[in-house]
Amino acid sequence: MPILSLDAVSKSFGALKVADHVSFDLEPGEALGVIGPNGAGKSTLFNLIAGNLRPDGGRILLDGRDVTAGSAMTRCLAGIGRSFQIPQPFGHLTIYENLLVAARFGGGFPAREAPEHCMNILQRTGLTAQAARLSGTLPLLQRKRLELARAMATAPRLILLDEIAGGLTEAECIELVATIRQIHAEGTAIIWIEHVLHALTSVVERLMVLNFGRMLMIGSPDKVMASPEVREIYLGIEA
Ligand SMILES: Nc1ncnc2c1ncn2[C@@H]1O[C@H](COP(=O)(O)OP(=O)(O)OP(=O)(O)O)[C@@H](O)[C@H]1O
């Protein structure tokens, strides 16, 4: 059974259609990349999947159960973790405290188990040395790592990553990709919105292209990137 299914999910903001009958299945442990021009509706799709937005039509199933009406909190506890394109830490808390909040309230970890779990995530995301630092003052790389770490701290079975590699140097990007590959190797399903294509295609098994809220194509990265229509819309290369 797919871990996630979208069935004709639609959403408009006034006259602007940002999700137009989007349907796809994601298998447990699968990694799916999402690309598309600015404003195509990629982050909106995450808001719909994670429960931050309610669709106007269609259904969202998690493990075959209809969660369309469920809150972001219940979906997080049910196994959907997410990162935000613009990092949204609790700035007045330390990195470690941010992870504790995610583990306790987003992951449902009991108080006695949460600290060890968070220490483990700190180590895996290269944040151990920074654990006591206030998260409101972090440079970009650390903010991106914290965003990933907070999503991991909820112990998700499906993790949504929104432009986690954008703005990083090549070396920083390689480190981050290694962490994402490890998450994938452990069997966590991933949906990853990313403009850094080489990072994305080094991890995902399938790519989805969104344009004006519509799913233009979904398939293997090679097949999708070879499509003249995708190259024209996404890369601006005329067929
Ligand atoms: N809450 C909102 N109210 C009104 N319009 C919105 C809202 N959220 C997003 N939009 C609009 O919906 C469209 C899709 O936005 P979205 O952020 O999903 O695109 P995106 O594909 O993630 O873009 P980018 O690559 O620039 O992050 C944009 O035109 C955006 O301005």
Image (spheres, helix red, strand yellow):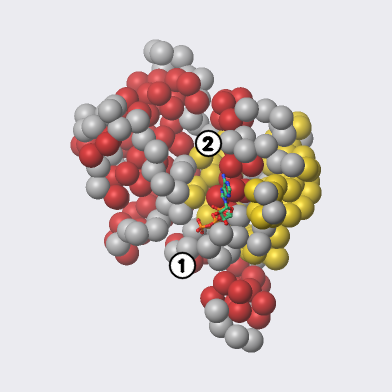
Q: Which residue is mark 1?
A: 198
Q: Position of residue 208 (x, y in %)?
A: 64, 60
Residue 159 against residue 140 in the figure, above or below: above
Q: Position of residue 162 (x, y in %)?
A: 49, 50
10 Å crowding of disc 1: few (<14), some (14-19), many (20+): few
SS at badge 1: helix
Residue 107 against residue 40 in the figure, above or below: above
Residue shown at 21%/36% (left/top)?
A: 129
SS at badge 2: strand
Residue shown at 56%/66% (left/top)?
A: 37
Residue shown at 55%/79% (left/top)?
A: 236
Farthest residue, direction front:
14
Q: Position of residue 45 (x, y in %)?
A: 62, 48
- Is residue 179 something that shows in the picture? yes
For the N terminus, give its image quadrant.
Answer: top right
Sequence-wise first label, 2 or 1: 2
Q: Which residue is mark 2?
A: 81
Quick check: 100 left or right of 71? left
- Queried on whether the Cβ of the residue with tag 2 lies below 8 angstroms from ligand 1, the answer reads no
What kind of residue is marked 2? Gly
10 Å crowding of disc 2: few (<14), some (14-19), many (20+): many
Q: Position of residue 235 (x, y in %)?
A: 54, 76
What kind of residue is marked 1? His
For the C terminus, give its image quadrant.
Answer: bottom right
Quick check: 109 left or right of 4? left
Q: Are discs 2 and 1 less than 8 Å apart at CB?
A: no
Residue shown at 49%/58% (left/top)?
A: 194
